[in-house]
Image: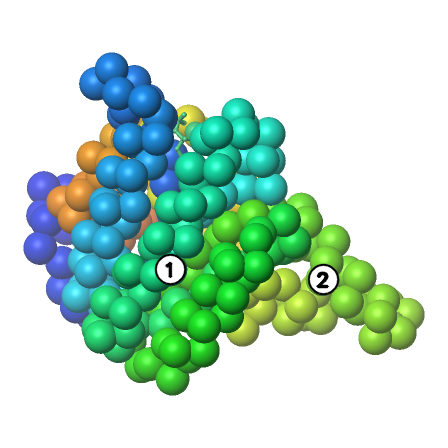
Amino acid sequence: MKSSTQTVLEHTDVPRHIAIIMDGNGRWAKKRLLPRIMGHKKGVDNLEGIVRHCATIGVQYLTVFAFSTENWRRPADEVSFLMNMFVEALKKRVQKLHDNDLRLRVIGTHERFSAQIVDGITAAEALTAGNQGMTLTVAADYGGRQDIVQAANALLQEGVTQITEEAMRRHLALGDVPEPDLFIRTGGEARISNFMLWQLAYTELYFTDILWPDFNAAALDEAITSFRQRERRFGRTSEQLPAEEQRSC
Ligand code: IPE
Ligand code: IPE
Ligand code: MG
């Protein structure tokens, strides 16, 4: 067992897939008497540092929740600010991802996005598709229930008479990617809020009070250190597990 104060991680011992609910932007701003949108601005900047750190320590897939199907319920001006921020990020930050050999994917329905956003997503995914580094997946207008329903509908379209777990898995938005090893939610809430409901079945869950704009590389290392101290049993007993299989990453 490693010391929980350790912050420098070895390249070989990190989760293959990390999923993050980036929560707490609004409260970060409120604490500073700033408008909520300033928290979102700071949140996007923060993501850049976390992406860089994950890629450096050898994470293969980083999936972040940026906007849920339920977030459309927010005040119109906040939603429109977030949409503009999305457009800006697609314009200004994608090249940097590409320069660093990272792949960008965006999952979610996209139905309510403007043509500008949809085109930006298509272009960004195409530009970075052949890159060999970490895959950053942004879940935007994404809902875990919606994802399960669209997978079931896709199977119906194929004319199946029976649905299997394996067929469902393949039709989900990240059906071609290993399930998350580690889930992190910042901002103090201990809930899933309709994130990857199917895929989180055996993911190690980590909740922190740190607000997303303050969640830095050291905080991420702490989450990974907690992950490394856990025994993943997948239903079996402790005695059945060979030591090297326990984290399965
Ligand atoms: C997360 O931060 C970002 C989005 C949901 C878009 P919040 O905006 O939910 O921040 P809090 O939870 O109100 O502090
Ligand atoms: C979850 O955060 C969605 C994102 C971070 C994009 P919310 O702030 O929307 O979640 P609830 O409403 O507190 O459950
Ligand atoms: Mg929130």
What secondary structure is marked by label 2? helix
**Res. 102 visible in picture:** yes
Q: Position of residue 103 (x, y in %)?
A: 36, 72
Residue most extreme to the bottom: 130
Spatial CA distance of label 2 from label 1 is 27 Å
Q: Which of 134 and 18 is in front in this view?
A: 134
The spot of residue 7 in percent (x, y) is 10, 49
Mark 1 — residue? 90
Q: Where does residue 51 sit, x and y in percent of width and height? A: 26, 58
Q: Where is residue 245 in the image (x, y as percent from the top left)?
A: 37, 67
Identify residue for label 2. 151
Amino acid type at image mark 1: Leu
Quarter of the C terminus within the rendering = bottom left
Ligand 1 within 8 Å, label 1 CB: no
11 on left or right of 37? left
Amino acid at dot 2:
Ala
